[in-house]
Image (tube, rainbow, N blue to C red):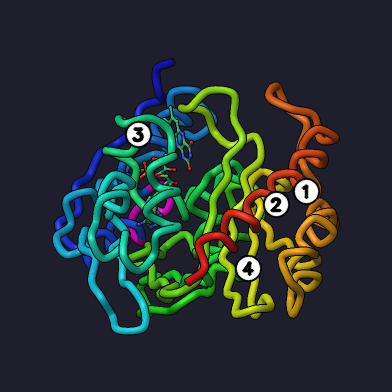
Amino acid sequence: MIPAAFDYEVADSVEQALELLTAKPDAKLLAGGHSLLPAMKLRFSRPAALIDIARIPGLDTVTDGGDHVAIGALVRHCELERDAIVRAELPLLAYAAGLAGDRQVRHRGTIGGSLAHADPAGDLPAIALTLDAEIVARGPSGERTIAAADFFRGIYTTALAPDELIVQVRVPKTAGAGWSYLKFRRRSIDWAMVGVAAVVRANGSIDEARISLVNMGPKPVRASAVEDALHGGSSDGVAAAAAHAAEGTDPPTDTWASSDFRRHLAPVLTEQAVNEALSRTG
Ligand code: FAD
């Protein structure tokens, strides 16, 4: 469990981090280190150098952007959990961040690292997808914004170029919407065997339903068949709509669960999550 040898650089600014990334194409950015360092210790990852971005000023703030919340890439899970703006405007994100790993993980892991790592079992990628978040990336040629729906490409793979870094995540506010995140796992510190995130707006009938699934394929997926079936309906139709949850998914078989068990879990959890979200609508 000892990583291969690597150089270590500390970046004091985004510009310096980008210069180092360009100068050292085999380098990796280091934020909270709670995904990268375990991978290096197992020698799944062998970067020639680490560029430590954890102390870059200005990337660790949460600000109210009017219709959205702007979250710096270095904001840690524990800060998402307790930040007043996130709790008020994005309760789903605050809640889900509080379920990631254990206390130590939540005190080191960052939102930028979670999204860039794109673990199909990770909580925050699916939450970003449900909330229609935008990822702001900066590279040598400037800044661009990537919708969460276009960001996750596959297992540990994103739309980020090797010389780009995430600087911010912009998340539209969900005021008035009901929400739920159900994470099925054996122990409270485990990753999701399957997770379901839901945001629902209803006024008599269901006006909008956004549902994403964790660990039902190589990347987080929207349960669009469920969303379509719920639209315009009422709470009476939730069970029938949720039955579509595993459609179009490709869940893995691993030491925690078989693919078939995950296909069974997805509709069960989706029904519960949508009902919980409906119970929280204004
Ligand atoms: P790092 O490990 O520093 O980096 C991860 C990757 O992202 C690296 O490739 C790095 O180069 C890249 N990167 C980091 N920051 C940026 C950036 N700003 N721009 C571009 N690339 C960047 N996560 C969950 O979601 N749910 C869990 O239940 C969970 N359980 C865990 C349990 C344990 C025991 C551990 C060790 C981790 C667990 N995690 C879990 C993962 C944890 O949330 C990680 O901290 C997180 O996924 C990665 O964030 P980080 O800041 O530590 O990133």
Pick whichever of labels 3 and 4 is earlier in the sequence. Answer: 3
| Total numbered badges shown on the rendered structure | 4
Q: Residue furthest top?
A: 1
Q: Is the Cβ of the residue at disc 1 closer than 8 Å to that at disc 2? A: yes
Disc 3 C-beta below 8 A from ligand 1? yes
Res. 173 in view: yes
- Disc 2 to disc 3, C-alpha distance: 27 Å
Q: Position of residue 170 (x, y in %)?
A: 38, 72
Q: Is the Cβ of the residue at disc 2 closer than 8 Å to that at disc 4? A: no
- Disc 3 to disc 4, C-alpha distance: 28 Å
Q: Label 3 sits on what residue type?
A: Val
Is residue 25 located in the magenta-colored stretch of the structure?
Answer: yes
The residue where tag 1 is placed is 267
Q: Position of residue 280 (x, y in %)?
A: 50, 62
Query: Which residue sits at x=85%, y=59%?
Result: 240
Q: Is the Cβ of the residue at disc 1 closer than 8 Å to that at disc 4? A: no
The residue where tag 2 is placed is 270
Label 3 Cα crowd, 10 Å radius (few <14 / some 14-19 / many 20+): some
Q: Label 2 sits on what residue type?
A: Thr
* Element marked by disc 2: helix
Q: Label 1 sits on what residue type?
A: Pro
Numbered mark located on residue 105 in the image:
3
Numbered mark located on residue 210 in the image:
4
* Element marked by disc 3: helix
- Disc 1 to disc 2, C-alpha distance: 5 Å
Q: Is residue 41 left or right of residue 69?
A: right
Q: Nearer the viewer, mark 3 or mark 1?
A: 1
Q: Please, is residue 196 above or below residue 37 in the view?
A: below
Q: Which residues are magenta?
A: 22-28
The quarter of the picture where the N terminus appears is: top left
- Disc 3 to disc 1, C-alpha distance: 29 Å
Label 2 Cα crowd, 10 Å radius (few <14 / some 14-19 / many 20+): many
